[in-house]
Image (tube, rainbow, N blue to C red):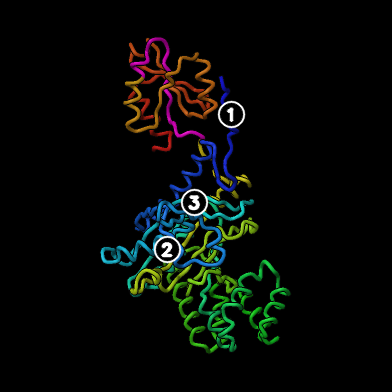
Amino acid sequence: MNEQKIIKPRKLSGFMELQPKDQLVFDNMLDQIKSVYLKHNFLPLDTPVLELSEILLAKSGGEIDKEVYRFTKGDTDICMRYDLTVPLARFVAMHNETLHYPFKRFQIGKVYRGERAQKGRFREFVQCDADIIGNGELSLVADGECLKMVDEVFEKLGLDIVNQVSNRNILFGYIEGLGYQKELKQILTILDKINKIGKENAKQELEKLNIKTQDIAKLIEIIEKRGNFDEILPKIENLSTNQTFLKGVSELKEVYSYAKNMGINQNKILLDLSIIRGQDYYTGTVFEAIIPSHKEFGTVCGGGRYDNLASYFSEKNFPGVGLSIGFTRLFDLLMANNMLKANPSTNIDLQIIPLGNTLSECLQLQQYFSQQLQCEVAYENRSFKAKMKDANKQNIPYILIVGEDEIKNQIYALKNMANSTQQNLSKEDCLALLLKNTSKN
């Protein structure tokens, strides 16, 4: 008889897989983010993981093309989505006649990038996106609302962040005003990575573009403008007479005024002209949130305004503004640094333990409690001591002990596992106490 070969269980690198107790924390945090999006009247959207390659790669290029998971099924060329923005653009173009504008949507879902797996980088990860799309035009109030949501999301998660905000038109116009319109994209690319390569290397790269020494100094100086809005805005508004520059300053002032009116904590929002966001589609407001106590985490949320979301799929103009949280990476960083909120390691509020021949009655009690609580019956054929030990290991907060006397008298022993106290109560009183003392209150 041939012996079956045992395959060693293993998973692909770059794919997160959590223990159930950690998955509960992960899901709870996603629910908190979702609650903020819903509070601001964003509608849920769930686009397919698989898209036609012609659609998904329409706006891509360069490194992204190399990272996309792409395959064919029959004659169909298919890609796995690498972000949630292109599927949104396709959705808006397909359904634009039936959508109400501004169209406010959020999507929380997995995306896939076949890059080299390393610390902080995943091949499969959850993104939490929220976007506001206009039809032809979109008020800058939408930019302010996105900044407000970033503030509320991280407050909900119990994380102190600072949102660094700029407007790309300021640098666009400043560079044009210096006479380097042809070199604009190359200059922005260099300035965008100055924090990684350092000033000296940035200066050398700018020199290779034949940028004048005095202009290099001006470019370095302007992107170092960072601080309180009320302090920095007066220092930059007269740096150039270029119309694009002045448009950027005006937009930034307007967005800041909306943010203040929406009640954003002024200590959690900074003007930072070094925020460029490398993606070409950003055309106005841009922002990146960091955790000041852990700057090594880098950006934990980013986003901005784009002029035309669906230009590859429609001749209509759909301006938008949005934010995105790379949640899997954020969770991994928080877990590695012991920064996660304390959460119960189970979703069970009450476990019923039968004693003697009471299983049928325990199942009936489960139906009663399950209408308002997470409840289960420990029905396995094990000793009472083993079941109590297992419940304690799972951090189940309450145990209901049900023996034949309890069934006869309709009075049950309810044990608080945290402090080992026990009360004898009717099922109605048990439910009232549990609702008062659990998260269901």
List x then y, in percent, for residue 118.
Answer: 63, 51
Q: Which mark is residue 161?
A: none
For label 3, the crowd category at 10 Å Cα-Cα, with few meaning under 14, some 14 to 19 and many 20 or more, is many
Q: CA distance from mark 3 to mark 2?
A: 23 Å
Q: Which residue is mark 3?
A: 126
Q: Quadrant of residue 229?
A: bottom right
Disc 3 marks a residue whose amino acid type is Val
Residue at 44%, 76% in the rendered image: 254
Give the quadrant of residue 62.
bottom right
Q: Secondary structure at mark 1?
A: loop
Label 2 element class: helix
Q: Do labels 3 and 2 touch, CB within 8 Å?
A: no
Which residue is labeled 2 in the image?
54
Residue 141 seen in the current view: no
Q: Mark 2 packing: few (<14 Cα in 10 Å), some, or many (20+)?
A: few
Q: Is residue 177 left or right of residue 432?
A: right
Residue range in magenta is: 345-362
Separation of residues labelled 1 and 2 (CA atoms): 41 Å
Measuring from the top left, give residue 142's x and y in whole percent. Answer: 40, 68
